[in-house]
């Protein structure tokens, strides 16, 4: 565990550690991340000392690069399970890797893979979990554990619980329980089987999430057609 009172981005610090002989399972964590990276070049903003912002170094050398969606799968399930100890029932995975509580984002994941030829070298899994922050900008659909549970949650206890749960899902992946993980992910998807509004290629439509394919692409039923989308090609509207 590398604890930094403040840093620009734990994912960046973890990337630097990859040039040393850092062990799998190393965690870089900070209380005050001032240039946090989000998906798609966005920023991840987190009030100092109120939330968890950390990165986990993995060496999933047993996976093929084409199986990289399984990293998203096991991490999202690990986070979901740890959250459910405090927020039972309504924690879902919004495809591909956002964790939602009651239709609002409570945690985000930024997975950065280092591939070498046709093999995995390492993977940085950056996790931002809103724990005790209660104010969020109006233009983002965000919530926190404190808003959901109506009480403060101790950060270290939550980190321990996340680590336990993530480690247990990682060992399922190491033991090749891929079908079980995929099934569990499928049933955890936000909006699964429900009629929802989407926007894709500049058009809005109503459809039903059917699941994901083996590469993790989203499958949405629109009328009699099943449409397949890559990350960022479709947005679910609320
Ligand atoms: C998202 O956009 O949903 C992904 C957010 C990921 C944020 C975490 S916070 C810890 C780690 N370090 C970063 O710079 N980003 C990730």
Image (cartoon, helix red, strand yellow):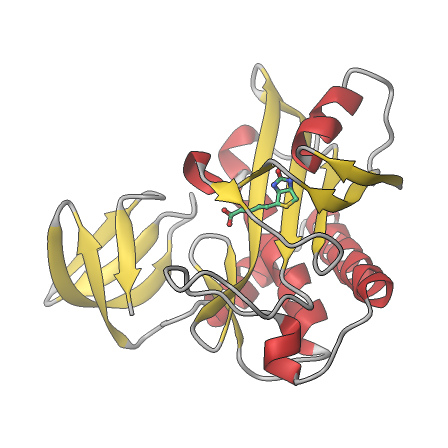
> Where is residue 4, by image quadrant?
top right
* x and y, in percent, of residue 206 in the image: 15, 68
Closer to the camera in the image, 107 or 225? 107
The answer to whether residue 196 is left or right of residue 169 is left
Q: Residue at x 42, y 73 (%)?
A: 103
Instruction: Tell me: residue 107, above or below residue 154.
Output: above
The answer to whether residue 92 is left or right of residue 212 is right
Instruction: Tell me: residue 78, above or below residue 30.
Output: below
Q: Quadrant of ligand 1?
A: top right
- The count of marks equals 0
* x and y, in percent, of residue 196 in the image: 24, 72
Q: Residue at x 40, y 64 (%)?
A: 138
Q: Residue at x 46, y 69 (%)?
A: 104
* x and y, in percent, of residue 38 in the image: 51, 42
The quarter of the picture where the N terminus appears is top right
> Where is residue 49, by image quadrant?
bottom right
* x and y, in percent, of residue 43 in the image: 50, 41
Closer to the camera in the image, 134 or 124? 134
């Amino acid at each position: 565990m590398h604890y930094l009172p403040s840093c620009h981005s734990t994912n960046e610090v973890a990337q630097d550690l990859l040039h040393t002989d850092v062990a799998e399972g190393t965690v870089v964590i900070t209380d005050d991340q001032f240039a946090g990276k989000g998906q798609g070049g966005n920023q991840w903003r987190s009030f100092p000392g109120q939330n968890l912002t950390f990165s986990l170094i993995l060496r999933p050398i047993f996976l093929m690069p084409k199986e990289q969606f399984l990293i998203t799968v096991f991490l999202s399930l690990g986070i979901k399970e740890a959250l459910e100890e405090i927020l039972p029932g309504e924690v879902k995975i919004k495809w591909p890797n956002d964790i939602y509580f009651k239709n609002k984002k409570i945690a985000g994941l930024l997975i950065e893979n280092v591939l070498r030829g046709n093999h995995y070298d390492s993977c940085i899994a950056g996790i931002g979990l809103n724990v005790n922050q209660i104010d969020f900008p109006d233009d983002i659909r965000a919530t926190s554990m404190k808003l959901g549970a109506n009480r403060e949650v101790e950060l270290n206890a939550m980190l321990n619980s996340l680590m336990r749960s993530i480690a247990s899902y990682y060992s399922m992946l190491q033991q090749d329980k891929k079908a079980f993980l995929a099934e569990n992910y499928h049933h955890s998807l936000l909006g699964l089987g429900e009629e929802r509004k989407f926007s894709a290629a500049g058009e809005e439509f109503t459809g039903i999430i059917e699941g994901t394919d083996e590469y993790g692409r989203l499958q949405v039923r629109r009328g009699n057609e099943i449409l397949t989308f890559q990350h960022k090609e479709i947005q679910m509207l609320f």
